Image: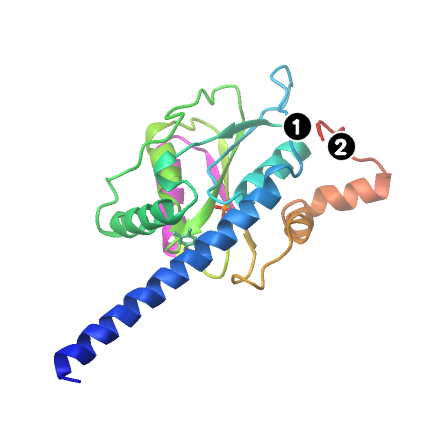
Amino acid sequence: MTTSHWILTAVALALLAVFAYLYAVTWIESHQARQLEGKQLYASTSTGTSRSAVVYFSRSGNTALAARHVAQRLDAKLFTLEAPSYELGMGGLAYAVMDANARRSKPEVLPGTTPRTIDLKPFDTVWIGSPVWLYSPAPPIWAFVEHNRFDGQHVVLFNTFNSHIGDDYIAALKTKVLERGAKSFEHKRVLRGRMTQQLKSEQMLQVIDEEWFAADTERDCEQHVFPESTLVS
Ligand SMILES: Cc1cc2nc3c(=O)[nH]c(=O)nc-3n(C[C@H](O)[C@H](O)[C@H](O)COP(=O)(O)O)c2cc1C
């Protein structure tokens, strides 16, 4: 074989490996999304008196489950951000990687989300949930923060992720949220572990209860009372 044949074979093998990796990731994500879809459904009560809102973006369902859990605990109003460019599948995954990467050099380039703006005035606390993409909250969250105001509110960013978050990105998002009027900012996270060794959904929710709501859980256990449930399944 000539040198050019070797190079062509090496390139073909590398492309095949990338394709196989993307295919495996996509398969795992779709499988997870199907499993999580029906778990812990939550109907936010529009007449509720809760002063908390939970706004989230999720691609494969994990942040969505965390968001439903948080909203149920707080009896909060739940808002989903849709970003069709990143739907499950190889195309969506490719766009997710490309856009997350593009944001590093061009933070002003933001994806469209539906809804683009939400009337958050009725709320004192706004929870914002997102997966981590390339160490940063996913682009739809940056778009949401850019297009909305948080005047006088306490904002809690929460992330689900596999292994690493860039603290510099969290600091940058905090700055942005405060610039958009928030009075305070908090960050919560749940580490799910690398693919094939991840927490089960019940374990993820247990971590959330223990780490994010430690004080409430202790108080509930002492008093043997649990928040009124708005679970619909
Ligand atoms: C494009 C892309 C990039 C990702 N980058 C990271 C990363 O940098 N660090 C990390 O810990 N997890 C990363 N992940 C994993 C997700 O953050 C993690 O699986 C998350 O829980 C998925 O949430 P979702 O199911 O709500 O979409 C990435 C996932 C995708 C699709």
Local crowd at mark 2 within 10 Å, few (<14), some, or many (≥20)?
few
Q: Secondary structure at mark 1?
A: loop
Residue type (three-letter) at the residue carrying disc 2: Pro
Tell me: 152 left or right of 100. Answer: right
Q: Which mark is residue 75?
A: 1
Q: Could you say where residue 222 lies in the image, as x and y percent from the top left? A: 84, 43
In the rendered image, which quarter is residue 109 located in? top left
Q: Tell me the residue at 47%/23% (across/down).
A: 120
Q: Could you say where residue 12 lies in the image, as x and y percent from the top left? A: 26, 69
Residue tagged 2 = 227
Q: Which span is picked out in magenta?
A: 168-187
Tell me: 65 left or right of 155. Answer: right
In-front residue for pair 154/225: 225
Chosen colour scheme: rainbow
In the picture, the quarter occupied by the N terminus is bottom left
In-front residue for pair 150/91: 91
